[in-house]
């Protein structure tokens, strides 16, 4: 005997009248019985779905964390040094084969979860800066460029600026140069160093209107993985966290 | 003229674009479905911190695993919910281990992790989302049939709709919702 149609299975699941031989078949056939049970479960779950209290969006900063982590994955291929590719669509390989998936031990993940409290991470990072700034491992008379990276838009990967880390007499300076002044709209622009783990970030300072600005940073930050330079658009909203609205970004080479 | 009136077609296009490595497609998926993912994680885990961690992990995993998205299965939302269930289960396992390690110091008795009926929250919330997304009159018919538990005759009278049309919406709608849950199950059991 042939299986009932999907429509007939729905009717059986909902207790609607069907031909006797159809329901007799379902009692004999494991496949159809499973289908009917699945449909009943669907109806049950739909009936109990009214008691939810509304959608709750995650904090805006979560999106910045997502893109920072993805940028860290894509780094080896994202760093196209040459301006000719600017403007072409960003097109990584077709599958996960080229993506780096880093397994994280359970212990490390728990620790990182705790570290994820945004404010706490900022405070902790500030402490690190405060404690370790100036006690860096290079000799103070060595000056010069340490590393630099193109700053690109997140969506189209258009190169629109550059960030460089320069060793100075008493620490490191991060210099940000944009090809043209960025539009801050009603708000202001803020420069961040995002950790390669995508979990933590520190605010480096406010980018003044114009095309270039320099901020003091420390070797300790770089050593701890704060290597993704990010310029965000912020609103005057008394929220110290990243707005999630990143304009340009680039990861400093190791 | 707007060419994307059908949300299913639009979703399938997003899936194809994501599979091809388009980051703007990921951003669009985040805009649409991060509240769904976040609400599920929040229900299941209870803290905003853990829930936002799960959101981050789900969308990073979506990007890394974009080749496993099956555009023909229709719904990136169900795919994301499947990944969410995975991540929520991971967090729960970690909590259980942490709890067990603490317990083990005091006693050999190991209790099972607190599992409540909320294991169905992911599916329930996905169905809420699907009903919100589904066009009328089908969504209304399904709400009346399943949430308000009204008979098909009653629905037909109230909506001034032929009984056959009501039955047809119920059948198509329930099958569609069933397919979404199957997709969740496929991804979550990988």
Image (cartoon, helix red, strand yellow):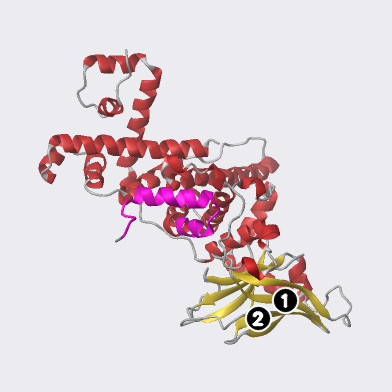
Would you say A82 lies left or right of A180 here?
Answer: right
Q: Is residue A187 magenta?
A: no
Looking at the rendering, in which quadrant would you find the N terminus of chain A?
Answer: top left
Report the residue at 55% width, 65% height from top.
A156
Please tell me the numbered disc located at residue A177: 2
Q: Main secondary structure of the magenta part?
A: helix
Report the residue at 66% width, 49% height from top.
A98
Which chain is disc 1 placed on?
A
Where are the magenta residues, as a range?
B2-29
Report the residue at 50% width, 66% height from top.
A60
Q: Residues within 10 Å of mark 2 (few under 14, many from 20)?
A: some
Please tell me the numbered disc located at residue A164: 1
Q: Is residue B11 magenta?
A: yes
For the residues bearing labels 2 and 1, Cβ distance under 8 angstroms: yes
Q: Residues within 10 Å of mark 1 (few under 14, many from 20)?
A: some
Q: Position of residue A236 (x, y in %)?
A: 49, 81
Looking at the rendering, in which quadrant would you find the C terminus of chain A?
Answer: bottom right
Would you say A10 lies left or right of A232 here?
Answer: left
């Amino acid at each position: 005997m042939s299986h009932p149609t999907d429509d007939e299975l729905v009717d059986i699941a909902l207790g609607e009248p069907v031909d006797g031989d159809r329901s007799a078949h379902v009692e004999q056939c494991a496949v159809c019985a499973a289908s009917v049970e699945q449909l009943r479960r669907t109806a049950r779950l739909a009936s109990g779905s009214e008691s939810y209290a509304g959608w709750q969006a995650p904090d805006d900063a979560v999106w910045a964390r997502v893109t920072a982590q993805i940028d860290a994955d894509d780094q080896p291929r994202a760093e196209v040094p040459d301006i000719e590719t600017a403007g072409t669509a960003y097109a990584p390989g077709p599958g996960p084969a080229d993506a780096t998936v880093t397994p994280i031990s359970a212990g490390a993940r728990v620790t990182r979860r705790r570290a994820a409290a945004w404010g706490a991470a900022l405070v902790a990072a500030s402490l690190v800066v405060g404690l370790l700034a100036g006690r860096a491992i290079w000799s103070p008379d060595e000056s010069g460029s340490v590393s630099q990276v193109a700053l690109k838009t997140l969506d189209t990967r258009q190169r629109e600026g550059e960030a460089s880390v320069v060793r100075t007499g008493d620490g490191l300076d991060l210099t940000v140069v944009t090809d043209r002044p960025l539009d801050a709209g009603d708000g202001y622009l803020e420069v961040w160093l995002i950790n390669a783990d995508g979990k933590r970030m520190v605010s480096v300072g406010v980018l003044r209107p114009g095309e270039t600005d320099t901020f003091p940073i420390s070797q300790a930050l770089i050593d701890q993985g704060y290597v993704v330079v990010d310029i965000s658009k912020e609103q005057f909203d008394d929220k110290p966290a990243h707005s999630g609205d990143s304009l340009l970004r680039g990861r400093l080479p190791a | 003229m707007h060419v994307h009136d059908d949300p299913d077609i639009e979703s399938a296009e997003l899936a194809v674009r994501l599979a091809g490595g388009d980051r703007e497609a990921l951003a669009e998926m985040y805009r649409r479905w991060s509240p769904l993912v976040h609400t599920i994680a929040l229900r299941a885990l209870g803290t905003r911190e853990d829930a936002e961690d799960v959101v981050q992990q789900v969308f990073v995993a979506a990007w890394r695993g974009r080749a496993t998205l099956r555009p023909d299965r229709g719904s990136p939302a169900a795919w994301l919910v499947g990944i969410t269930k995975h991540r929520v289960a991971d967090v729960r396992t970690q909590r259980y281990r942490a709890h067990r390690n603490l317990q083990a110091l005091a006693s050999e008795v190991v209790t099972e992790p607190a599992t409540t009926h909320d294991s169905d929250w992911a599916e329930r919330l996905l169905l809420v989302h699907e009903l919100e997304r589904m066009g009328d009159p089908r969504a209304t018919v399904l709400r009346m049939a399943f949430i308000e538990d009204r008979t098909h005759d009653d629905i037909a009278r109230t909506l001034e709709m032929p009984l056959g049309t009501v039955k047809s919406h119920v059948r198509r709608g329930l099958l569609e919702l069933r397919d979404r849950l199957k997709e969740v199950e496929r991804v979550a059991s990988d």
